Image (spheres, rainbow, N blue to C red):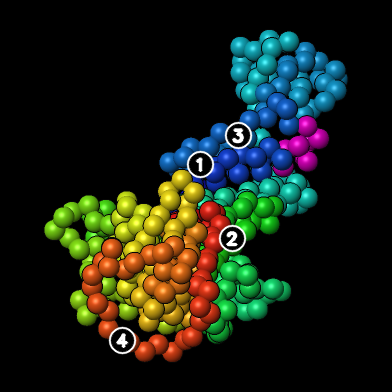
Amino acid sequence: MNSDLKVALDMLEREREISREALFEAIKNSLVTACRNHFKSADNVRVEIDEDTCEFHVIATKEVIELADDVMDPAIEISWDEAKEIDPQVQPGGFVEVEINSKEFGRIATQNAKNVITQKIREEERNVIYNQFFEKKADVITGVVQRRVGKGYSINLGKTDALLLDTECVPTERLKQGGRIKVYVLDVLSTPKGPKITVSRSHPTLVKRLFEEEVTEIKDGTVEIMAIAREAGSRTKMAVVSHNPNVDPVGACVGVNGSRVNAIVNELYGEKIDIINWSENPGELIQNALSPAKIVNVFADPEERTANVVVPDLQLSLAIGKSGQNARLAAKLTNYKIDIKSETQAKDAFGFRVEDYMGDEYGDEEYEEEYSEEGYTEETNGDEGGEE
């Protein structure tokens, strides 16, 4: 048994997760390369390895030549006298298998063989890493901020590094060297220098994956996230539905005393998260999406993907949100172009009467933001709506 080789192979297989078959293939290729360098030819050479004992043999098939003086190339030919010592029954013109002692290879041939093995091990390591992270594409993993690299950050993922571009960072976050962060795997590419992994902190699906990790009901399929709209670092709106009538989807995501949603808010450094109930009814969905504002009525056109929303006069600023954010996120979440008007504006524009639709009285609440009496319209790109 070649114990030293067996120990080395076991270590490579265990520590670098390289398959034993790939290692044996590397050894065979290296020995064939050594023969080619030593004898200038290796077309007649094969390598046999016992995978249990790691014993290997290099065998050359040579043609038997009757007279020793007629042997022109010892690498592929052998005299009849020498051949009979290996196989007494062999005749001139036949073939005999000769075992080559690999220890006789020269220094250059040995070094080339070593290089072949080393190169193969590196290739296999890159393949292992690529396959591991390719399976994690569109998933969330934890990394450590290494250093600033060009227009982004190098994030150490353990066996390799990923690139977090500035365009995929959250504007309000300040990443610190050595800090641990969770990132969304955008893409994994195979390159000659190894896998190239790009990650994101601003992608909307990052929030979805974090909820899948945190909320058992989402993980087991009881609760489903139907759509997400996000302005990274500021606010996210998420619509959820329950496939079990006994499970409240919003309550499941929030958790006891907000424990579940707060864990995700902390991971996102304080980003606010609004969780609403999903509805197949576009009017109801838009009403939920504009929460926390109260809605008088919604007139939705599913074919045109447009909606006119009427809110109490004192609720207009709340429906629109600071800098229009609430309306903008609602439009992205529902993939509808939303036109929000107060009751007064709606009466002037459409002859609308509140009492014809809803008799509830709304309290006189004060809000910080003041907006134009022309109302607010937010148009969303279809590519941004819902989950990516």
**Cα–Cα span, label 2 and label 4:** 53 Å
Q: Position of residue 81 (x, y in %)?
A: 72, 19
> Which residue type carries mark 1?
Glu
- Does 359 appear in magenta? no
Instruction: For mark 2, give the secondary structure.
Output: strand
What numbered label is drawn on residue 197?
Answer: 2
Select label 2 or label 1 by which is in front: 2
Instruction: For mark 3, give the secondary structure.
Output: strand
Q: Residue at x 39, y 78 (%)?
A: 313
Bin the neighbour count of mark 3 within 10 Å (Cα to Cα): few under 14, some 14-19, many 20 and up.
some
Q: What is the magenta range?
A: 34-41
Select label 2 or label 4 by which is in front: 4
Q: Which residue is labeled 3 in the image? A: 47
Select label 4 or label 1 by which is in front: 4
As drawn, is 282 to the left or to the right of 173?
Answer: left
Q: Which residue is labeled 1 in the image? A: 21
Q: Residue at x 61, y 18 (%)?
A: 87
Instruction: For mark 1, give the secondary structure.
Output: helix
Circles 2 and 1 in contact, beta carbons < 8 Å: no
Select label 4 or label 3 by which is in front: 4
Instruction: Between residue 80 and residue 314, name the one nearer to us.
Output: 314
> Which residue type carries mark 2?
Ile
As drawn, is 138 to the left or to the right of 252?
Answer: right
In the image, residue 295 above or below residue 180: above
Q: Which quarter of the figure has residue 367?
A: bottom left
